[in-house]
Image (cartoon, rainbow, N blue to C red):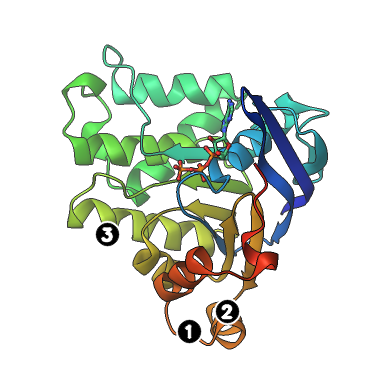
């Protein structure tokens, strides 16, 4: 379970203060896929950085499986998996070496790590790649390896940042199957993406973020009822064009 309560982060810049994340609250249950969506600069990355314990909140907190990320970032990290479009691999290690190395970093016992690797290699179809040098993999093969890496310590909460960016149709399909696997395995999943069409197909719950605040939250049907719009893309355009001060109040 991921719980975020009144999370707030401000940055001082030359011209004043940016309210990057402004009292954000959300909850993601096991087996649920939550789409954290927003235009450029909405506050998605800043939110993820605080959940990952990389950035100290000014106010509020994030709890991963009951552990507060700002209080015990190491314990919280062990409960988190993170997959990002910009993930790299260690080119000189074999895939097996690299994945076991990451398992070790997360404190997974060697026997358990080997068993976990076997299981995930089968699910993500990378058995034939395990003894290849990571640097020799194609983009699609590397993607599968980084998806396995995010799960090697069996975390209950998964964060996926722009997981389909730069991928072809087969790569995108792999991500869809991976998210189905996460849902079936009872992970609490957060997906940040600009691909609203994909989010509609993938996510159970949505948070539409604008200027650091969640403006709409709920299932797609909840959002449709609230906004009178059918698709996320129309809801977004309305949100960004809105003159309603409650929606557009400038926080910078
Ligand atoms: N270190 C920083 N110093 C100053 N301002 C920052 C810093 N990090 C983020 N910001 C500002 O905070 C706001 C939110 O940025 P953030 O990167 O979280 O948005 P985002 O939703 O991830 O955007 P994108 O979709 O473009 O990646 C932006 O106005 C950004 O300029």
Residue hosting label 1: 229
Q: Nearer the viewer, residue 6 or 125?
A: 6
Tell me, yes or no, whether the two marked residues, 3 and 1, touch with CB atoms within 8 Å: no
In primary-sequence order, the first of circles 2 and 1 is 2
Residue hosting label 2: 223
Q: Position of residue 33 (x, y in %)?
A: 55, 62
Q: Is mark 2 within 8 Å of ligand 1?
A: no
Q: Is residue 126 visible?
A: yes
CA distance for labels 2 and 3:
26 Å
Q: Secondary structure at mark 3?
A: helix
Which residue is at 80% across, 27% downward? Answer: 72
Residue hosting label 3: 173
Tell me, yes or no, whether the two marked residues, 2 and 1, touch with CB atoms within 8 Å: yes
Label 1 CA crowd tier, 10 Å (few <14, some 14–19, many 20+): some
Which residue is at 56% across, 53% downward? Answer: 190
Q: Position of residue 54 (x, y in %)?
A: 64, 26
| Total numbered badges shown on the rendered structure | 3
Relative to 167, 46 lies left or right: right
Looking at the image, is mark 2 or mark 3 nearer the viewer?
2
In primary-sequence order, the first of circles 3 and 1 is 3
């Amino acid at each position: 379970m991921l719980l975020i309560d009144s999370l707030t982060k401000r940055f001082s810049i030359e011209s004043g203060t940016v309210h990057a994340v402004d009292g954000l609250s959300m909850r993601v249950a096991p087996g649920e896929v939550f789409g954290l969506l927003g235009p450029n600069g909405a506050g998605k990355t800043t939110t993820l950085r605080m959940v990952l314990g990389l950035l100290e909140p000014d106010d509020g907190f994030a709890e991963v499986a009951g552990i507060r990320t700002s209080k015990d970032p190491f314990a919280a990290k062990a409960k988190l998996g993170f997959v990002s479009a910009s993930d790299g691999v260690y080119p000189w290690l074999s895939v097996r070496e690299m994945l076991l190395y990451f398992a070790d970093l997360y404190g997974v016992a060697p026997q358990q790590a080997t068993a976990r690797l076997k299981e995930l290699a089968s699910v993500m179809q990378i058995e034939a790649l395990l003894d290849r040098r990571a640097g020799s993999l194609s983009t699609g093969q590397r993607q599968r390896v980084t998806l396995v890496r995010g799960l090697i310590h069996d975390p209950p909460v998964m964060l996926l940042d722009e997981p389909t960016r730069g991928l072809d149709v087969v790569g995108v399909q792999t991500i869809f199957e991976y998210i189905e696997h996460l849902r079936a395995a009872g992970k609490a999943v957060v997906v940040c993406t600009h691909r609203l069409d994909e989010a509609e197909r993938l996510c159970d719950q949505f948070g539409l973020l604008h200027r650091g605040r969640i403006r709409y939250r709920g299932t797609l049907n909840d959002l449709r009822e609230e906004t009178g719009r059918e698709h996320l893309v129309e809801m977004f355009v309305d949100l960004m064009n809105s003159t309603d001060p409650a929606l557009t109040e400038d926080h910078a």
